Amino acid sequence: MKKNSTTHSAQNVDEIVSNALTELMSTKTLDDLDQWRIRYLGRKGIVVQLKRSISDLPSAERPEFGQTINSASKELEAKLLNKQEEILATDSKKTAESIDVTLPGVPVNNGSLHPITQTIRDICDAFTAMGFEVIEGPEVELDYYNFQMLNIPKHHPARDGFNTLWIDQEDSNGEKPMLLRTHTSPMQIRTMENQEPPVRLIVPGKVYRYEATDSSHEWHFSQIEGLAVDKGITFANLKGTLYEFARKLFGEDVKVRFRCDYFPFVEPGAEMSIDWNSRTNQTGDANWIEILGAGMVHPKVLKAVGYDTDKYTGFAFGIGVERIAMLKNGIDDIRLFYNNDIRFLGQF
Ligand code: DAH
């Protein structure tokens, strides 16, 4: 005799499926859907129960009933997937609609040039406008270019002033031929060696000194070297060029002052200062601040690169970039440039 004949009729399975589908229609969320899945298709769900009850049937009826259950189960699984897609689609549509495009966006931080880069560009602009070419050179340099060819032979006292960082590599004489350049002047030599006059160049770049740091000293900093060699170049050309540079950078009213100074690679040598007060139209005593070294290229330097000193003369200068950037921006500590503090850098 059939046990529990209602459970084991195909009609009953149809009823279960149609109930299941009605319930499915009204699910709105993925959570609801999961509850539904557990109820019908879960490990202890109705479909599994139906499958288990097959063994209660007489063996002749089992295959047909088994098939009915299998196709019912497949149908429910297919409908489950459809419903899941439907819910996901409406959810994402809702999220899209909930984006208020009129709200202000997330602020984006704009980058800017480092103040030293900006200053280098300003200085280069002033000189390129006067016909100077911008070139760069190596930071690891030979003693030969950094000192010897600039009229600073071995054991010359001027070397003491350059607090040199040497590269730890000796030649056959036990001497160290390489260093981190202490100034950008070696590019004077490297250029003149390969080029006949006229020469008009500026060389921005980093230089290194073995020095303790404080508010006005860094062990690495930037310079801009300048060189002009041609027929008939005089000290008046030097003054005129550097005065024009000062006006471009600090304003038309700026006052400059030249005084004697000594550098082995120039004769005569000079330093140029600007009157910081003149720039801002302030009255009162002048406030002279030195911003560069300069001079007429020493004949020994011109001869060393094979230039005819009867034909050619020239002037050279070296500008400390950090000094200028500090003056222009009212910065009182050189170390701020290299601390990488966004609160400082963000101001430029
Ligand atoms: N090289 C010098 C230094 O680092 C600066 C300098 C002075 C460069 C006079 C020049 C010059 O070309 O003529 O102290």
Image (cartoon, grey):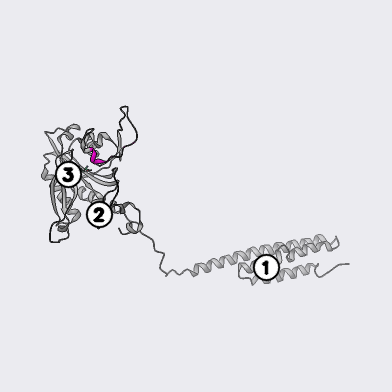
Local secondary structure at mark 3:
strand
Q: Which mark is residue 294?
A: 3
Q: Which residue is mark 1?
A: 36
Mark 2 or mark 1: name the one nearer the start of the chain. 1
Q: Would residue 334 appear left or right of 306 to someone viewing this image?
A: right
Image point (23%, 50%), residue name = 123
Q: Would residue 220 appear left or right of 13 to someone viewing this image?
A: left
Tell me how far mark 1 sits from mark 3, CA to CA. Answer: 89 Å
Residue 281 in percent (x, y) is at 15, 61
Q: Residue furthest top?
A: 172
Query: Label 3 amino acid?
Result: Ala
Labels 3 & 2 near each other (Cβ < 8 A) = no
Tell me how far mark 3 sits from mark 2, CA to CA. Answer: 21 Å
- Boundaries of the magenta span: 159-167
Residue 246 in percent (x, y) is at 17, 52
| Ligand 1, image quadrant it occupies | top left
Of residues 163 and 19, the one drawn nearer to the viewer in this rendering: 163
Of residues 156 and 69, the one drawn nearer to the viewer in this rendering: 156
Label 2 neighbour load within 10 Å: few <14, some 14-19, many 20+: some
Snapshot quadrant of residue 35 = bottom right
Of residues 331 and 84, the one drawn nearer to the viewer in this rendering: 331
Q: Which residue is mark 2?
A: 326
Residue 185 in view of the camera? no
Q: CB at mark 3 closer than 8 A to ligand 1? A: yes
